[in-house]
Image (tube, coloured by chain):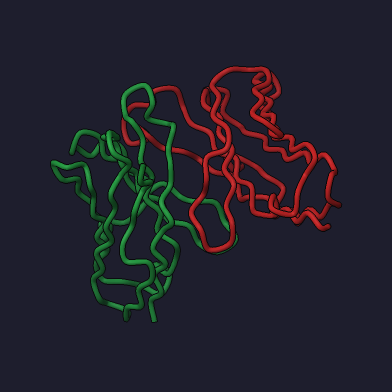
Amino acid sequence: QKEVEQDPGPLSVPEGAIVSLNCTYSNSAFQYFMWYRQYSRKGPELLMYTYSSGNKEDGRFTAQVDKSSKYISLFIRDSQPSDSATYLCAISLSHAGGTSYGKLTFGQGTILTVHP
Amino acid sequence: DAGVTQSPTHLIKTRGQHVTLRCSPISGHKSVSWYQQVLGQGPQFIFQYYEKEERGRGNFPDRFSARQFPNYSSELNVNALLLGDSALYLCASSPGGLGIYEQYFGPGTRLTVT
């Protein structure tokens, strides 16, 4: 079983739609949760960073963490063609020791296309 | 402020050769991590350096090594290149300490091994 599961899509939505992207994880010890956006042939861009259950909002983006279900989500409101990219969830242990120090574990990424 | 910079942008090498990739973190950041991303997959953790010491290591062979310099820049070295080493190599910068997981990525170096 992979530590982080993410539906690769692809996901295609019309402009203005609400997009829901999701990941599940297997280890309840994971404490930090991130969402990255990656445009084709570019490095990932940090969108959201949270370490607690509940919602965190930043503009059109809302990150949701449910630790009891080991489930994280990213919602994009009023989606735009410029949001077309691959979205990666990433998780990490809280102050992991040993060889896992500083390690982010990524999902496979979901390819999103927003068409005009 | 400049973000994370990486060099070179692209690189083509032959099997068995050696490669060195370079990374400069965001000003004020003391931690650098290296990841490998193959097409269609999420990045895989290779190394983490904080205050010039290796603090984390992923499941990669000993052909992979890295170091961090006094100015917090970093190099990733890969020896005896294999075709399977072809990937996008990403460097991530973070403040370190309590902010170790707030990682900002550079544009990557695309390595092709022929």
B58 and A35: which one is in front? A35
In the displayed structure, A28 sits above or below A9; it is above
Q: Residue at x 58, y 32 (%)?
A: A48
B78 relative position to B12: left or right: left
Where residue B44 sits: x, y (%)? Answer: 46, 50
Where residue B47 sits: x, y (%)? Answer: 32, 45
B94 relative position to A2: left or right: left
Figure quadrant of residue B49: top left
Chain in red?
Answer: A
B17 and A38: which one is in front? A38
Q: Residue at x 42, y 31 (%)?
A: B101
Chain in green?
Answer: B
Which quadrant is the N terminus of chain B positioned in? top left
A37 relative position to B17: left or right: right
Q: Residue at x 61, y 32 (%)?
A: A26
Where residue A33 sits: x, y (%)? Answer: 56, 30
